[in-house]
Amino acid sequence: MESIDRKTFIASAGAATLAATANTTARAASDVVFLSTWKWGVEANRRAAEVFSGGGSLLDAIEKGINVVEDDPNVTTVGYGGLPNAEGEVELDAGIMDGTAHRAGAVCNLHKIKNPISVARLVMERTRHTTMAGGGALRFAIAMGFEPMQLLTPRSLEAWLKWKNAPHHQTFWIDGEHHDTIGMVGASGGNVAAGCSTSGLAWKIPGRVADSPLVGCGYYADDAAGAASATGDGDVMAGYCTSKHIVQKMAEGMHPQEACRDLMRYMAKTARDLRTSMYCVIAMNPRGEIGALSMNAAQPLHYALWRDGTGTLHTAPHYLS
Ligand code: ASP
């Protein structure tokens, strides 16, 4: 067996440390791009970049980035402080996908757990399943060590009581709207990943599941083509498999922005309320080129981009002129 003297060991250990440092530095500075929906995406991207540059994987980065928004009581459409369903219960949906392994994990109608994206990741990594819902998802989360808690904040409880006590309050047996999502896609070294998390529509009919936790709808990722995520009226968008559509178009050679346009073109043929409803998407290819688009000017999409170590906030173009 070849022996190694102390000097050689120290020299090679030092070289390895230097190489690791150099790798980490190079990785943090220039080889990761994150794209997220809405203004809270800025902080989510910053956290994702921090996790990534600290040695975390792309999935770690996306999960932890999304956790920031889930933990924020001021975001009333995601995680803790999200507005509840019609019965006053906060009901969360989330999904995550690894574009390298082509594996996804999701939870729907999850109560009492403020980080559904983390539970979704464990569904992906610790089970043979893809999606878990309701009471089973809650029991799974508890078995995985998550602590159940009250997700209503004084602010969201007050908003629900106000809605509930309004004589002719809007219900989703007919129509209505208050929603948003944190959707995030990331690329590094040719790999992509995607995730999204939401409390869905405020005052929704309990049990409602829309696009966010459905693979290919709220999120999709494939290293061979890219990643995408959607936000907006998920009851409509789910019918167009939006994220899969966009990734498929990137696989056919479209730039992410053109792939987003292709999706809107497809939706515009049949989707309802094109000029008033919110239909928005983001996309990224494995090279880190991006796309972002809303259907109409009345419901603009703001998106956060992390590139070259810097975070910025932008307004996406809209499809309908
Ligand atoms: N798509 C989500 C839902 O319908 C909400 C949103 O992204 O605005 O539940």
Image (cartoon, rainbow, N blue to C red):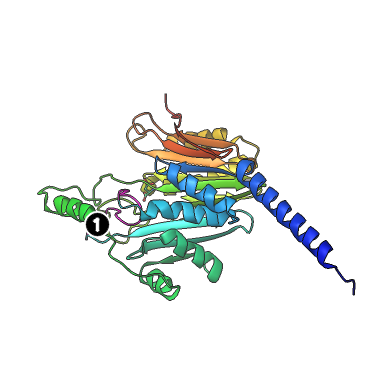
Q: Label 1 belongs to which residue? A: 153
Q: Residue at x 45, y 32 (%)?
A: 314
Q: The C terminus is located in which quarter?
A: top left
Disc 1 crowd, CA 10 A, few/some/many (<14, 14-19, 20+): some
Q: Position of residue 313 (x, y in %)?
A: 45, 35
Q: Is mark 1 within 8 Å of ligand 1?
A: no
User: Does residue 203 appear anywhere in the picture?
Assistant: yes
Horizontal side of 155 relative to 136 (left or right) equals left
Magenta-highlighted residues: 74-87
User: Does residue 269 appear anywhere in the picture?
Assistant: no
Q: The N terminus is located in which quarter?
A: bottom right
Q: Residue furthest left?
A: 167
Q: Nearer the viewer, residue 54 or 129?
A: 54
Q: Give the vertical position of 160 relative to 316 (above or below).
A: below
Does 83 lie within the magenta span? yes
Q: Position of residue 319 (x, y in %)?
A: 45, 29
Does 196 lie within the magenta span? no
Q: Give the vertical position of 147 relative to 281 (above or below).
A: below
Q: Count how many numbered circles sit on residues in the image.
A: 1
Q: Residue at x 32, y 34 (%)?
A: 276
The amino acid type found where label 1 is placed reads Thr
